[in-house]
Amino acid sequence: MKSGGVSRVLLIEDDPAVREGLELALTRHGHRVRAVDSGEQGLDRLRTDLPDVVVLDLMLPGIDGFEVCRRIRAAGETPIIMLTARGDDIDVVAGLEAGADDYVVKPVQPRVLEARIRAVLRRIGRDQAELERHGDLTIDRAGLVVANRGVPVGLAPTELRLLLELSGTPGRVHSRQQLLESVWEHGYFGDSRLVDACVQRLRAKIEDDSAAPVYVQTVRGFGYRFGPV
């Protein structure tokens, strides 16, 4: 995020009315917004503008939002908030699996989107404590760096925040709702699929065998815990 608290938002939305409305609302909230109407333009701007967060419509002409999401995630760890039509559960799951950090249902309420943007940016900027070692996994909470056997692991902001939350209390079981509130800052009506999808992505990056996880373990009927390693 730039100095003075001004964040750079890349908005990829093909509907002119939605795009212009969200651009105006987010600008009024103090964000620096670049708005484009296609996935191709969005990917070009990602390289040149270096946004702090991407707001991505899933239903785009040409390269669709799912493919854009995968390419953004393959290129780096920029947070992605996807915009999805109401009731499209399959799209939500597919978007999360493609690497999105959060989602907002259309028609979008600007105050809700603004809150989600602030939340995802806080996940990046939170100060943490010192270096920790858990088996072969090293977590630098001050530098926000994770390494496995000395090799840095690239984690998206939400994946990193989830790991920091779980590893902060090894052995403690966290319910999905607790993780939604602490990591995503969602209230009572948060979607537990956010947690499950993020756990899957995190395991794929830090576990030797994601089917038999050592670090992020499932406690059936309750939630997740870290270790003990």
Image (spheres, grey):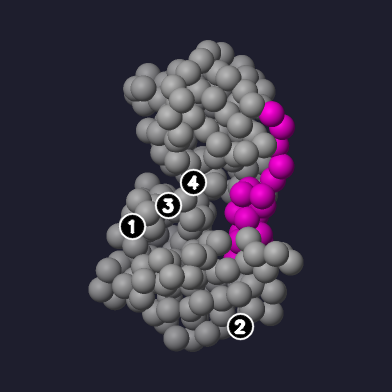
* Alpha carbon separation for disc pair 1 and 2: 27 Å
Residue 100 at x, y percent in the picture: 44, 53
Amino acid marked by disc 2? Leu
State the extent of the magenta-drawn residues as a range.
112-130
Marks 2 and 3: in contact by CB < 8 Å?
A: no
Q: Disc number at residue 71?
A: 1
Residue type (three-letter) at the residue carrying disc 4: Ala
x, y percent for residue 47: 41, 66
Which of disc 4 and disc 1 is earlier in sequence? 1
Q: Name the residue under label 2.
A: 24
Question: Residue at the spot x=58%, y=68% of the render?
Answer: 8
- Dot 3 lies on which element? loop
Q: What element carries label 4?
A: loop
The residue where tag 3 is placed is 76
Upstream in the sequence, badge 1 or badge 2? 2
- Quadrant in which residue 169 is drawn: top right
* Residue 126 within the segment the image draws in magenta: yes
